Image: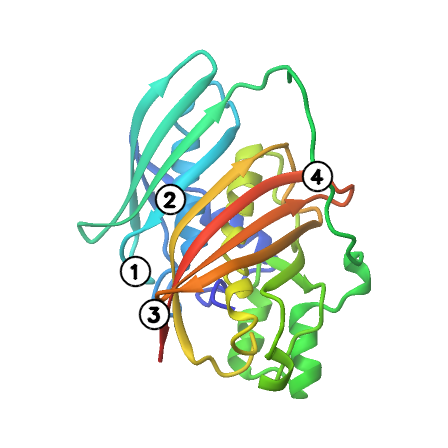
Amino acid sequence: MRALREEYEVTNPAEGLVDLLDLERIEVNIFRGRSPQESLQRVFGGQVAGQALVAAGRTVEDARPVHSLHAYFLRPGRPGVPIVYEVERVRDGRSFTTRRVKAVQEGRTIFALTASFHRPEEAAFAHQRPPRHLTDPESLPRLADEIRDHLGALPEALERMARRQPFDIRYVERLRWSPEEVRGADARSAVWMRAVGPLGDDPLVHTCALTYASDMTLLDAVRIPVEPLWGPRGYDLASLDHAMWFHRPFRADEWFLYDQESPIATGGRGLARGQIFDREGRLLVSVVQEGLFRAL
């Protein structure tokens, strides 16, 4: 649960996520974001990506929606240290707006993002491959409950983190807990997710909240044939880069299905691809990420 916040108690963790994405504007193109103090070695990558996208979006005057982002995680961020986001206004066109964002912490660039925004227009044509048939979220256990049922009780640290988790996560397939169960497993994973409370009505907040969530489970698909996801981990992992394409409007506080797969892992790196669908089976977002995997 590397995305779980450990700094403060909130009545509704979704409110904490909205607060985390509410950047302080300190100049026309410069913003500052909080980085909560936590026990992790590095700042959660989804937090930095979500905050950087907020910074980019706040400089787009006509509020046109983002249609893609491409990002690199350059250095690990330090928890508890504010992050400054510097936005470059690359292009303001009639149909497309382009922004580049640098995330700077203690004078060093830790993250770089390019985002493109597209004015909605009439489609010349449309098509979409249907999603796999998967179980409805209500019939699945919450992640914390599934872990609690297996272990008998959540360890105290996980219990605290679960209370702060801004997303309800439910794995479509049961978790594997032993090397025997993992052996021969397909490098594929799917989870239902939604924010645990309302996120308001700003479409940019929902886009950035889903960007945050997109980094929470995607690299699971790389690890599934190697080791149990929630047992002792034999590998250190870090996100290297992240790309997203936003196809349709959505709300991150409504159920969405994150279908994830890994076509390859080699040379210390693993590639994962994800597709995010709504309950009606409409494709909302496509995601690709590469991660670094090193034996502990």
Instruction: Please give the label number shown on residue 71.
Output: 2
Do we see residue 133 in this rendering? Answer: yes
Q: Say few, some or many: other residues with alpha carbon within 10 Å of mark 2 (under 14 / 14 to 19 / 20 or more).
A: many
- Mark 3 or mark 4, which is nearer the start of the sequence? 3
**Which type of secondary structure does the marked residue at label 1 adopt?**
loop
Q: Say few, some or many: other residues with alpha carbon within 10 Å of mark 4 (under 14 / 14 to 19 / 20 or more).
A: few
Give residue 60's quadrant in the image: top left
Q: Residue at x 58, y 65 (%)?
A: 187
1 vs 4, front mark: 4
The CA distance from mark 4 to mark 3 is: 39 Å
Front one among 290 and 55: 290
Indicate the amino acid at tag 1.
Answer: Pro
The answer to whether the residues at label 1 and label 3 have Cβ atoms under 8 Å apart is: yes
Front one among 223 and 251: 223
Kindly identify which residue carries mark 3.
41
The CA distance from mark 1 to mark 2 is: 14 Å
- Mark 2 or mark 1, which is nearer the start of the sequence? 2
Indicate the amino acid at tag 2.
Answer: Ala
Kindly identify which residue carries mark 4.
129
The answer to whether the residues at label 1 and label 4 have Cβ atoms under 8 Å apart is: no
2 vs 3, front mark: 2
Taking the image as shown, residue 248 lies to the left or right of residue 84, namely right
- Mark 4 or mark 2, which is nearer the start of the sequence? 2
Relative to 44, residue 56 above or below? above
Indicate the amino acid at tag 4.
Answer: Arg
The CA distance from mark 2 to mark 4 is: 26 Å
**Which type of secondary structure does the marked residue at label 4 adopt?**
loop
The CA distance from mark 1 to mark 3 is: 8 Å
The answer to whether the residues at label 4 and label 3 have Cβ atoms under 8 Å apart is: no
Front one among 66 and 262: 262
4 vs 3, front mark: 4
Kindly identify which residue carries mark 1.
76
